[in-house]
Image: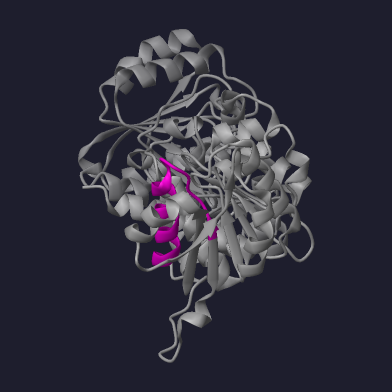
Amino acid sequence: MPMRVLNAAQMKEADRRTIDEIGIPSLVLMENAGRQAVAAMEAMYPDLLERQVAVLCGRGNNGGDGFVVARTLVQRGGDVSVFVVGRIAEVRGDARTNLEILGRLGVTVVEIADSQAWELHFSEVGDCMLIVDAMFGTGLNAPVSGLIESVIADVNASAIPVVSIDLPSGLSADSADPIGPSIHASLTVTLAAPKLPLVLPPAETHAGDIVIADIGIPGDVLDGVDGRRIELMTRSAMRELIAPRTPDSHKGDYGRVLLLAGSLGKTGAAHLAALGALRSGAGLVTVATPANCLPILAAMGPEYMTEALAEGGAGLDVDGVDRVLEIARDVIALGPGLGQAPGTRDFVRQLVERATTPLVVDADGLNAFAGDPDRLMGREGRDVIITPHSGEMARLVGMSADEVQASRLEIARNFAVAHHVYVVLKGHRTLIATPDEKVFINPTGNPGMATGGTGDVLTGMIAAWLVQLLDAEAACKLAVYLHGMAGDLAVP
């Protein structure tokens, strides 16, 4: 089942369908949320019942989840102090029901109705060893101010670990950018599905560790809500994309990749891309490279074949495009280390326009279209995958790298749809955008991969999985996920 990343409206609709159409009462969902939050807290803090815990509750459903957390801890013998940040008289609905249950159990709930009350009681919160943040969930759509802003500032300054329910209070479920002051959590137990600020920078740094709690909303409901389609890639979903090889298979069953890469001083890029393709299972890999680079590359890797490309005075000779098209078989990957000489740019543009096989375009293959991105188009029957980092994407769309970084998701999705290509926008939380408006977020990878050559390896990996799976979306997802996982496994 896909792991949808939902916004506030989509979560509200999923709740409604679960309650109205499936028949699970909202009070049950709230009970499940609170109990799942406690389970996540126990897993992270084995000494939970030995800690003094402060539960900060809002007036809405997020506060109701907090009341359930408090009751569950109290009933297990925990030392819990409960605070309503706001007026108790304004607590309504299911939250009110759970608040009243606490009262009947003899649990004192302290009202924090204004800044003076907060100043009076903050020392009680500050003496605790853990804070549960249940003030705001997905319903917040404007920056906090006044009392709530003071509470957030003081909690963050206290250095006490914080467990946030659904979202750190102050974040919006609709934006990866903090909309104002927000809690900096150690753990966020998000309900039913991940939300954008939990999985994309910069807001993700406020969330701490993430646990996705199953509160009883059916997977089909989460998958079926209308609106934007953003998914978080998971190990189980990636595993479903591949099957064991049959014992009687041979190299011809796993496709042929033609890689156009390398130039003097950059033969390593071609070598790394070829290795990425070979180690991802491509049956045959041929590296087409400038003639003066061929002896170097041939000596670097006996596993791949080589093909010489003629050069003129200004880069590759465009007459060589015919030869490339003649030897191309299943997938062409191009760009790593090719250089940006005028002849090379013309060569790349002609090849992309004339090729009938699927294409993976990276690095200098993309730079050839800087200032003229409309020539970089997919078409019916021929998939095109592009793999830019933020600088290459910026050159394609005529923006700065900082502007791309600030709107990665929107820029990747818009370019994919407008140009009918698959966009792999590399970086922390690499994004995959498809021509049909879907976006996938990759959770694997680490800062140790921020070094030259990792992108070249990814180019080869995508080409290899494309030639094996014959599905551009699946190839992008699997290659990106495994690429990041390899980096994670390499961490000492």
Q: Single out the residue that lies furthest toward the top.
A: 116
- The residue that appears at 40% across and 53% down in the rendered structure is 272
Range of residues picked out in magenta: 259-279
170, 96: nearer the viewer:
170
405, 117: nearer the viewer:
405
> Is 399 on the left or on the right of 263, as rendered?
right
- The residue that appears at 44% across and 26% down in the rendered structure is 183
Q: Is residue 151 magenta?
A: no
Q: Does the magenta stretch include residue 264?
A: yes
Q: Tell me how many marks there are.
A: 0
Image position, residue 436 (x, y; %)? 74, 54
Quadrant that contains the N terminus: bottom right
Whether residue 448 is situated above or below residue 220 in the rendered picture: above
Image position, residue 187 (x, y; %)? 37, 39
> Is 248 on the left or on the right of 191, as rendered?
left
- The residue that appears at 53% across and 45% down in the rendered structure is 338
> Which color mode does the image show?
one colour
- The residue that appears at 40% across and 90% down in the rendered structure is 247
Image position, residue 231 (x, y; %)? 58, 52
Residue 166 visible, this angle = no
Please identify the dominant SS of the magenta region: helix
Q: Determine the image quadrant of residue 321.
A: bottom right
